[in-house]
């Protein structure tokens, strides 16, 4: 019954905490019977343990105060993110209005007919981003470790290879992605975040227009860039300002051209 | 959201208990738990899916508590346990029970922070030694030695009934 292993101080504490396996627990109990001086000390530890638990238990039995309501905290967090987006984009919209008409930048709602397609892609990117960009539970289906699997999934559903851009040089870490539905069929959604947790997402799906120049799209919540290359439409979206997003859109377009 | 709700919500009472036992101030402790929950919400997707959610959340809370205590130490002397003990950690019971409880809380407060957190995580929050080691970011052997020292010291305080003096002395020395 009794093993060769001597009883250690660690065994005695594990005995107090009920962390020993049954056989070892029994061995310690026998040892304590034979050593009343040690048993007295260990009995004191057992009593302390009970008293501490009893003494602190009422705190855990108090009703949880409203400011610690988890559901409300989650909702407040999502709400704050949206508000932040809205403010930034109000500022971005003002800037765009001021410089409007100078480049090929066109505000949403005032687009020539051949840009309708890009308008739809930007809108779809924003729709997906409004759901997954604010999701803390499962923003992506496949993470960075499953990048190859994600690319394979996208290629099989879209019947097109889609380049997964690398934005690490711009400070954006690849979070992963998923396939999402749009009113024009399935699309790939890739998500990135920077060191502060600010997220951006790129949506890509087959487009009717093979090539379309880059256009900027701003709503009260988000700003985005959309374009088409080689029969694939791309929409890049974020809650940041357009001038921050523009270089990222250019970089993505460069990487896609390189891979074509 | 559901996973997060199901896993984190049941922990909230225990998080409050741990925070209050460490800080001995109800509103400071609840503020800390709120901070902890907000961080857990923001970083939920970053946690390792195979990791234990409770260990992960307790780690966040413990680190916040340590920072809070450091700030408090820099700000000035700690609230004396004689003033904080009864109102903050009191429980109903006969006078003798209350005295004993008061002594115990004072004794807990008199332990060095590193011993107190090990004792609370293991003996009250039922974390395994390995989980406590993870939360505190220390080797398991250090958990065992701190646990042994905590119990030895707390038992001595309770036996001599000198918690209040011992507490005062230790707190003064820390400054």
Image (spheres, grey):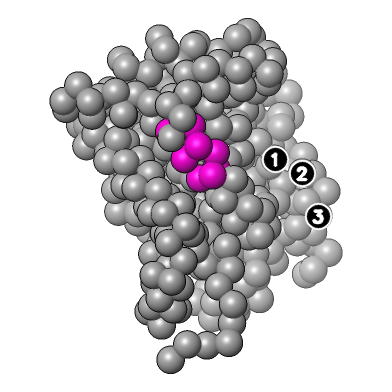
When asked about the image quadrant of residue B149, the answer is: top right
Element type at mark 1: loop
Q: Residue at x 36, y 34 (%)?
A: B16
Of the pair A196 and A123, the residue shown nearer to us = A196
Q: Is residue B127 left or right of residue B95?
A: right
Across and down, in percent, residue A166 comes to 75, 57
Element type at mark 2: loop
Chain ID for label 3?
Answer: A
In the rendered view, tell whether residue B7 sits above or below residue B74: below
Across and down, in percent, residue B157 comes to 48, 32
In the rendered view, tell whether residue B20 sits above or below residue A144: above
Q: Nearer the viewer, mark 2 or mark 3?
A: 2
Per the picture, the main secondary structure of the magenta-coloured stretch is helix
Of the pair A87 and B126, the residue shown nearer to us = B126
Are discs 2 and 3 located on one and the same chain? yes
Q: Which residues are magenta?
A: B150-158
Q: Residue at x 63, y 53 (%)?
A: B145
Q: Are marks 1 and 2 in contact (CB under 8 Å)?
A: yes
Across and down, in percent, residue A231 comes to 62, 65
Which residue is identified by label 3?
A: A254
In the rendered view, tell whether residue B166 sits above or below residue A63: above
Element type at mark 3: helix
Across and down, in percent, residue B19 comes to 44, 32
Q: Nearer the viewer, mark 3 or mark 1?
A: 1
Chain-order first, disc 1 or disc 2: 2
Q: Which mark is residue A171?
A: 2
- How far is disc 3 from disc 1 in space, using C-alphas? 23 Å
Q: Residues within 10 Å of mark 2 (few under 14, many from 20)?
A: few
Quadrant of the rendering where the C terminus of chain B is positioned: top right
Which residue is identified by label 1?
A: A195
Chain ID for label 2?
Answer: A
Q: Residue furthest bottom?
A: A1
């Amino acid at each position: 019954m009794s093993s060769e292993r001597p009883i250690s101080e660690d065994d005695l504490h594990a005995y107090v905490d009920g962390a020993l396996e049954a056989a070892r627990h029994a061995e310690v109990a026998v040892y304590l019977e034979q050593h009343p001086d040690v048993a007295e000390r260990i009995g004191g530890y057992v009593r302390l343990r009970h008293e501490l638990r009893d003494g602190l238990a009422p705190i855990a039995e108090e009703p949880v105060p409203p400011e610690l309501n988890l559901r409300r905290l989650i909702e407040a967090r999502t709400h704050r993110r949206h508000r932040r987006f809205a403010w930034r984009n109000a500022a971005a919209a003002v800037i765009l209005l001021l410089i409007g008409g100078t480049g090929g930048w066109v505000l949403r709602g005032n687009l020539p007919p051949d840009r309708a397609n890009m308008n739809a892609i930007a809108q779809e990117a924003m729709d997906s981003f409004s759901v997954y960009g604010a999701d803390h539970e499962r923003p992506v289906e496949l993470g960075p470790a499953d990048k190859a699997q994600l690319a394979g999934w996208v290629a099989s559903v879209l019947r097109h290879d889609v380049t997964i851009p690398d934005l690490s040089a711009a400070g954006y870490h690849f979070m992963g992605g998923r396939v999402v539905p749009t009113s024009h069929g399935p699309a790939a959604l890739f998500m990135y975040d920077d060191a502060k947790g600010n997220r951006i997402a790129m949506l890509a799906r087959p487009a009717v227009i093979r090539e379309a120049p880059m256009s900027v799209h701003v709503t009260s919540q988000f700003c985005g860039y959309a374009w088409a290359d080689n029969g694939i439409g791309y929409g890049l979206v974020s809650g940041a300002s357009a001038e921050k997003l523009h270089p990222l859109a250019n970089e993505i377009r460069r990487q896609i051209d390189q891979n074509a | 959201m559901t996973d997060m709700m199901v896993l984190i919500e049941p922990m909230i009472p225990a998080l409050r208990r741990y925070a209050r036992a460490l800080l001995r101030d109800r509103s400071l402790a609840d503020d800390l738990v709120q901070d902890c929950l907000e961080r857990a919400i923001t970083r939920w997707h970053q946690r390792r899916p195979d990791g234990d959610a409770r260990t992960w959340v307790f780690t966040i809370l413990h680190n916040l508590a340590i920072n809070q205590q450091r700030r408090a130490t820099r700000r000035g002397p700690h609230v004396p346990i004689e003033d904080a003990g009864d109102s903050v950690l009191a429980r109903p019971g006969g006078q003798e029970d209350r005295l004993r409880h008061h002594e115990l809380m004072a004794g807990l407060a008199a332990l060095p922070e590193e011993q107190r957190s090990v004792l609370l995580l293991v003996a009250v929050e039922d974390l395994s030694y390995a989980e406590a080691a993870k939360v505190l970011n220390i080797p398991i052997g250090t958990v065992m030695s701190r646990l042994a020292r905590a119990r030895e010291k707390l038992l001595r305080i309770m036996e001599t009934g000198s918690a209040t003096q011992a507490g005062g002395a230790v707190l003064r020395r820390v400054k």
